[in-house]
Amino acid sequence: MALAKKSIEELLGDEAEDLLTHECETIPKEKLNLPSPTYVDDMLGGSDRNPRVMRSLQTLLDNGRLGGTGYLSILPVDQGVEHSGGASFAPNPDYFDPEKIVQLAIEGGCNGVASTFGVLGSVARKYAHKIPFIVKINHNELMTYPNTYDQIMFGSVERAFDMGAVAVGATIYFGSEESNRQIQEVAKAFERAHELGMATILWCYTRNSAFKVDGKDYHSAADLTGQANHLGVTLQADIIKQKQPTTNGGYKALNMGDSSYGKLDEDIYDKLSSDHPIDLTRYQVANDYMGRAGLINSGGSSGKNDFAQAVRTAVINKRAGGMGLISGRKAFQRPMDEGIQLLNFIQDVYLDDNITVA
């Protein structure tokens, strides 16, 4: 049974006033390229993307409850590979069936559904013309013992094109030992996808055990994830998918004592960001060529306060200048009617004209 409807302010709780009234004093919003109904014309019209890519991206932006706003709500379900099918679908075994995944995206008013070759291919003839498909072309499989963490290709860009996808998605573990190979593979795949007229979405994840320093995890630091984003747009990703930052100072921590890593400038921390979550996310947007490539943040794992956490993430993303949310486990690891409601709550943030860019 669907939960009682709550307001965005109620879900934000004690953080409501801070998150809804904060004004960025770091990178001003006037310098950003913001999502809008004319986003494709404004951002791609002067680029080297061919008309077919522009059409594909417009198709994605025109679908669902957020259609025509410039914002995105995407349902991603590749966890059957990345986190194992049993662990992912045990909370609601219905989603072992690919059709249920696509139906959740449609009923939930999403712009598109992102999943594997197997999931989307199994229902392509029935649904590829009803909701935009985003085919995830590489994965980290969780069967190798001991578990390893490496994104490997599961199929070809041409296969995604043949099943009617409007976009392909890929992950790179920036900072890992395997990242150089992954960068080259994804660069080649994205070039081919653009040739065929598909848009490209890059999951820009940081991964290295060294990113945990003195018990603190910097994988979600704004400075490290911002640079991962910057590498992603260098590979010509049209949309960047990134975890929302929870801290900063990754480069600082990795340059303490005898350790030396990358390059940094104190202005990153003193002028271009602050400790506020909207300012931290604004720094991610800035690294996406000031918003020329849209930033979609991930919804994270499912837990006790999914509705509140999803709305909080959406408010921060929108007010930072981001393009939307890509939320999976919070939506599919529960009864379908509740999953639809959660997705609608996220979309309501982007549809609310009173929630403005900070």
Image (cartoon, grey):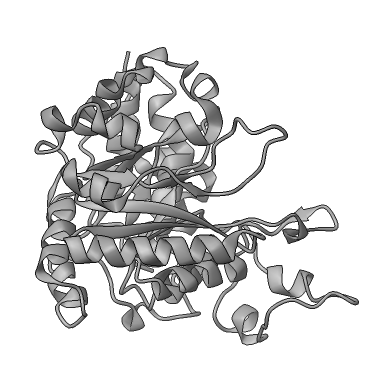
Is residue 337 shown left or right of residue 275? left
Looking at the rendering, which quadrant does residue 102 occupy?
top left
Q: Which residue shows up at 63% across the image and 46% down it?
A: 149
Relative height, residue 4 to residue 246 (above, below)? above
Regarding residue 135, the answer to whether it shows in the image is yes
User: Which residue is at the front of the view, 57 or 35?
Assistant: 57
User: Which residue is at the front of the view, 17 or 229?
Assistant: 229
Regarding residue 348, the answer to whether it shows in the image is no
Q: Where's residue 339, x and y in %? A: 34, 26
User: Which residue is at the front of the view, 341 or 206?
Assistant: 206
Q: Where's residue 320, x and y in %? A: 41, 65
Is residue 50 shown left or right of residue 264? left
Q: Where's residue 340, x and y in %? A: 28, 28
Q: Where's residue 54, x and y in %? A: 14, 66
User: Which residue is at the front of the view, 285 or 309?
Assistant: 285
Q: Quadrant of the C terminus?
A: bottom left
Exactly how many numbered labels are in the figure? 0
Q: Which residue shows up at 12% across the image and 53% down it?
A: 59
Is residue 100 shown left or right of residue 58? right
Q: Which residue shows up at 35% across the image and 60% down it?
A: 189
Q: Quadrant of the N terminus?
A: top left
